[in-house]
Amino acid sequence: MKHFDIAVIPGDGIGKEVVPPSLNVLNTIAELHGGLKFSFTEFPWSCEYYLEHGEMMPESGLETLKNFNAIFLGAVGNPEMVPDHISLWGLLIKIRRAFEQTINIRPAKYFKGLRSPLVNPKDFDLLVVRENSEGEYSEVGGRIHSGQDETAIQNAVFTRKGTERAMRYAFDLAKQRKNHVTSATKSNGIVHSMPFWDEVFRDVQKDYSDIGTASYHIDALAAAFVTKPEIFDVIVASNLFGDILTDIGGAIMGSIGIAPAANLNVNGKYPSMFEPVHGSAPDIVGKNIANPIGQIWTAKMMLDHFGEAELGQRLIDVIEEVTEDQYKTPDIGGKSTTNVVADEICSRLLK
Amino acid sequence: MKHFDIAVIPGDGIGKEVVPPSLNVLNTIAELHGGLKFSFTEFPWSCEYYLEHGEMMPESGLETLKNFNAIFLGAVGNPEMVPDHISLWGLLIKIRRAFEQTINIRPAKYFKGLRSPLVNPKDFDLLVVRENSEGEYSEVGGRIHSGQDETAIQNAVFTRKGTERAMRYAFDLAKQRKNHVTSATKSNGIVHSMPFWDEVFRDVQKDYSDIGTASYHIDALAAAFVTKPEIFDVIVASNLFGDILTDIGGAIMGSIGIAPAANLNVNGKYPSMFEPVHGSAPDIVGKNIANPIGQIWTAKMMLDHFGEAELGQRLIDVIEEVTEDQYKTPDIGGKSTTNVVADEICSRLLK
Ligand SMILES: CC(C)[C@H](C(=O)O)[C@@H](O)C(=O)O
Ligand SMILES: CC(C)[C@H](C(=O)O)[C@@H](O)C(=O)O
């Protein structure tokens, strides 16, 4: 029996609505497998928790999480309750950093059952490797002066180690895919970090002579995700650029509600965290219309991570089937509720 | 007779192909008007110029340009010849900074004759106001250590003055449009500059109680440009975010080759510069297939700037007519050459 202990953090807003049905899907997968067992331990850490306790998670939170095989997270943040930079850096980004989840991978692919907003989405199938530990997301910086003279300085920090690690990860993944890596840069406008990024890319590339490469400035790349997403295989991007590109990836699939993600610890010291691309969407809370597919597809990425890629594939096939048969939430043009979609996935898995 | 002295910098690549026909269009406009005259003085500053002279423009370049009523620029950059950060900071960004062109405005709107890649582009009509003098595009930063320890630091600098100026400009424009301003932020991930940005937005907003507002994180906003661009009116964005959004704006119109831009000096001390969103596109040089519309629409923005909004409107109407009648370059699904499109615009103007 393979047994996985999973820390579950539903978080805020629709996180609380899409996580429970996704746990049902995971249990169904375990049932299907026979030799697999998941134990879920839920933690209520969220903006609500903050308003009660003055912190997004208890001081011992990281210590507690450390012992799990993985973290399964819904969504964090609700600016009406807690400023975003406090809620995110107190929970989501805190975990990413503390657990050295230095790589964030996020696929986007054309799904037949979905309504892409693109006239001609072709068969795009891309994977963004996002540097997840440094770059533009940095606590270094501050302010000087006040009133009309107030000035804010934000430092982006790019280390060779962090940059190279993300790039090597991207090249290694490309080997298992279509042997192509695109670098997201902006070295024409951003003159310290991005020329450095380009140099490291050129260096790493030398070790992968069989992999084709391209380099796009982020503005042109964002546009190309709309005009010709089918030309991309693996894209490697900084923390911020990866963030932006993967939301566009969600959009061209048909809804940001579908897009999955994995925050990977690649040195084996800490658990990885699985968290979809979408946010907590406070505007649709309580209506049972949140799309559960992003969270369920994220569960598939967790299965892959646990070495159960075959079951992961089965799950993605079923997701595709179910959407083709019009079990869809309103964001993708359907009339089904969150639970109906998830339940349908469970019952088809068992067929 | 109104007489305008215009400095013309075709620059690199297709800049050299789309600028000359656009000057013909401007001459045609002058002819149509009767009381208007343009004098064009061309400068060969470009990557080619750099390879010959070791600089993108002569030392006296800014001194020379200062005396013109406006600068009309094609495109700068060709990384095969000169690294992008050198060519851009030696010419385009140098002029933006030296001439205090602190505001960059870039419209994107649905054109009937164009083939938007979106299934349902509705009637989107938005305007991005981009802060054009500071933010993420900063020369502040550098590197420390070498080899495996090398680290690059990039500083983004946001002043209250610069931030507020862009925001007020956006609110003032919204008054003449649909009374709505959306702020592009990322205060959940970028914790010094972006919460500052949000604060300034909240402050400025108080002076415009009749204007509706919204705030989107840049990732969600980029996605919304694809899924529901019709909901936006004016968007105010930092230098980098404005850059990214306006390329997506070009993409959803049907081609980045259409999108126009104006770099505005708003204190009256120096000339403004008119330059389309697209780059020099070295891959299509010499084929006479570059889309001239971005450059011609940019000429319309220059006409507006000169107080000739009526003629500007006439020009945009003709552009729309011509594309509807299928005079289109290949990037937007047509078979016409650069010159055929521009010539057709000229002859219809005179009709
Ligand atoms: C060429 C580059 C530096 C420039 C920018 O990023 O400002 C361009 O993309 C633009 O938008 O005008
Ligand atoms: C919530 C936010 C801080 C986060 C990020 O930007 O990393 C989110 O957008 C994501 O992509 O996971």
Image (tube, coloured by chain):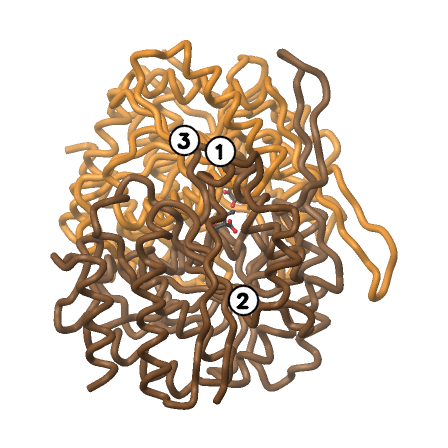
Chain colours: A brown, B orange
Q: In which quarter of the image is residue B149?
A: bottom right
Q: Mark 2 points at which residue?
A: A129
Q: x, y (%) of residue A197?
A: 68, 59
Q: x, y (%) of residue A66?
A: 63, 64
Callout 2 secondary element: strand
The reply to whether residue A221 is visible in this rendering is no
- Dot placed on the residue nearer the N-terminal end, 1 or 3: 1
User: On the same chain: label 1 and label 3?
Assistant: yes
Q: x, y (%) of residue A240?
A: 55, 50
B48 lies above or below B171: below
Q: Residue type at mark 2: give it.
A: Val
Relative to A191, B179 lies left or right: left
Residue depicted at 60% across the width and 57% down the height: A96
Residue depicted at 22% across the width and 58% down the height: A338
How many dots with numbers? 3
A220 lies above or below B29: below
Residue A51, label in figure:
1
- Dot placed on the residue nearer the N-terminal end, 3 or 2: 3
Q: Residue type at mark 3: give it.
A: Glu
Callout 1 secondary element: helix
Q: Quadrant of residue B19?
A: top left
Pointer 3 with pointer 2, Cβ within 8 A: no
Residue depicted at 87% across the width and 56% down the height: B145
Relative to A40, A117 lies left or right: left
Chain letter of disc 1? Answer: A
Residue A80, label in figure:
3
Q: Quadrant of the C terminus of chain A?
A: bottom left
Q: Residue type at mark 1: give it.
A: Leu
Q: How far apart are marks 1 and 3 (CA)?
A: 12 Å
